[in-house]
Image: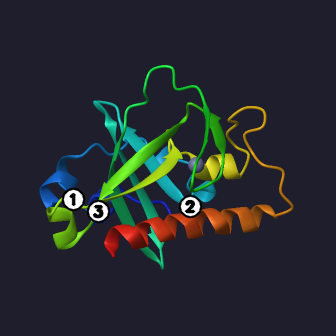
Amino acid sequence: MKPLTESEIRGAFVNCSKGEAKRLHVPRDLAERPWDDLDFLGWRDPQAPDRSYLVAELDGRAVALALRSSSAAAGQARLSMCSMCLTTHSGGVSLMVAAKTGKAGQQGNTVGAYMCSDLACPLYVRGKKDAGIGARLHETLTLEEKIQRTVANLAAFFAKVTA
Ligand SMILES: [Zn+2]
């Protein structure tokens, strides 16, 4: 995706108030992020570990979501699979919950998805980050097809949040 600036990212949030989008934590090292290898940029708030955020470029437009994650329960070492990039982690997958946009969100409606806790799906898909032995399924899909699938899963999640 093309590199985004802090103000572009803050302006892209669709499921939180403008005030929240202004205050929330945006990484300071945006210029050093591997944008060429990213289908979306995800990050956690170092001050509030249950808060994470992601910004993607969908249909040529930057869109960002504020997410809450359930804190991993103690002893949760079982294998779980990220529903975006289909990487299996031992304890490295969190249920990410996004408030829906508009009225539905104001009424407390949310959409959840199991995702890599570090939101580094694009790097796992490309083999730039290793989640350990057996983390990736052996598939006959090409890298391009796996990337397309991850983007499609992400787009489907955004569609549910904004429905
Ligand atoms: Zn993932």
Q: Secondary structure at mark 3?
A: loop
Q: Position of residue 90 (x, y in %)?
A: 62, 31
Q: Secondary structure at mark 1?
A: loop
Residue sitting farthest toward the right: 140
Is residue 25 placed above or below 133 in the rendered structure?
below
- CB-based contact (under 8 Å), mark 3 and mark 1: yes
Q: Which residue is mark 2?
A: 39
* Residue type at numbered disc 1: Cys
Residue 44 seen from this side? yes
Q: Quadrant of residue 49?
A: top left
Q: State which tag comes first along the sequence, 2 or 3.
A: 3
The residue drawn where x is 46% and y is 63% is 56
Q: Tell me how far mark 2 sits from mark 1, CA to CA.
A: 22 Å
Residue sitting farthest toward the top: 75
The residue drawn where x is 56% and y is 61% is 39
Near mark 3 (Cα within 10 A), the count class, few <14, some 14-19 or many ≥20, is: many
Q: State which tag comes first along the sequence, 2 or 1.
A: 1
Q: Which residue is mark 1?
A: 16
Q: Position of residue 12 (x, y in %)?
A: 31, 65
Q: Which residue is mark 3?
A: 13
User: Which callout, 3 or 1, points to the residue nearer the camera?
Assistant: 1
Image position of 81 (left or right of 130): left
